[in-house]
Image (cartoon, grey):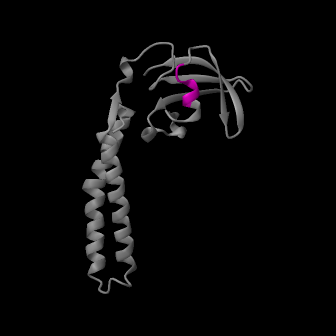
Amino acid sequence: MEKIPMTAGGHSALEAELKQRQQVERPRIIDAISEARAHGDLSENAEYHAAKEQQALNEGRIAELEDKLSRAEIIDISKLSGDIVKFGATVKLIDEDTEEERIWQIVGDMEADAKAGRISLSSPLARALIGKKLGTSVEVVTPKGARSYEIAAIQFV
């Protein structure tokens, strides 16, 4: 069973989602099924079928969360340091063509959120950055073509 690296914050967020799905969503869906069942003929009851579909989706997500949490390897970023990019690092990149600055934190797959500045360890950019030193230039093939970035800062916060 392969371990899944994640930050403590990412682990907490998954635990919170699991708790929400088990303690709030599951009872709500069961109530919806019971109510729909009371309406009679189940073969033509759209409310019943919709609630059963919601139940299947919720139970699938619960199983996925339980699996991920059981295989989680929590990495305490506050204990990391250095001038080499690794999991948990917050990296300031400067696009060598446009001089645009971007800041990314490298996190586990389950906690990646590009809008929040967190990229997955398995993303092309993160794979290109891992193991590189401060000041190094990195070329990454993106959907918009090849891009070159300079690693301007590495922090572990």
In the picture, the quarter occupied by the N terminus is top left
**Residue 134 occupies which quadrant of the picture?**
top right
Residue 123 image offset from top left, x and y in percent: 55, 36
Residue 5 image offset from top left, x and y in percent: 39, 32
Query: In the figure, 87 relative to 37: above or below?
Result: above
Question: Which residue, as the protein is rendered here, is positioned at the far bottom?
Answer: 41
Query: In the figure, 127 relative to 13: above or below?
Result: above
Q: Across the whole image, how many numbered discs are drawn on residues?
A: 0
Taking depth in this image into account, of 122 and 39 the one nearest to the observer is 122
Residue depicted at 49% across the width and 32% down the height? 121
Question: Which residue, as the protein is rendered here, is positioned at the far right?
Answer: 97
Question: Would you say 1 lies left or right of 136 here?
Answer: left
Residue depicted at 51% across the width and 13% down the height? 83
In the picture, the quarter occupied by the C terminus is top left
Residue 17 image offset from top left, x and y in percent: 33, 47
Question: Would you say 40 lies left or right of 110 here?
Answer: left
Magenta extent: 126-131
Does the stretch in magenta take in 130?
yes
Residue depicted at 51% across the width and 20% down the height? 85
**Residue 136 occupies which quadrant of the picture?**
top right
Residue 68 image offset from top left, x and y in percent: 35, 43
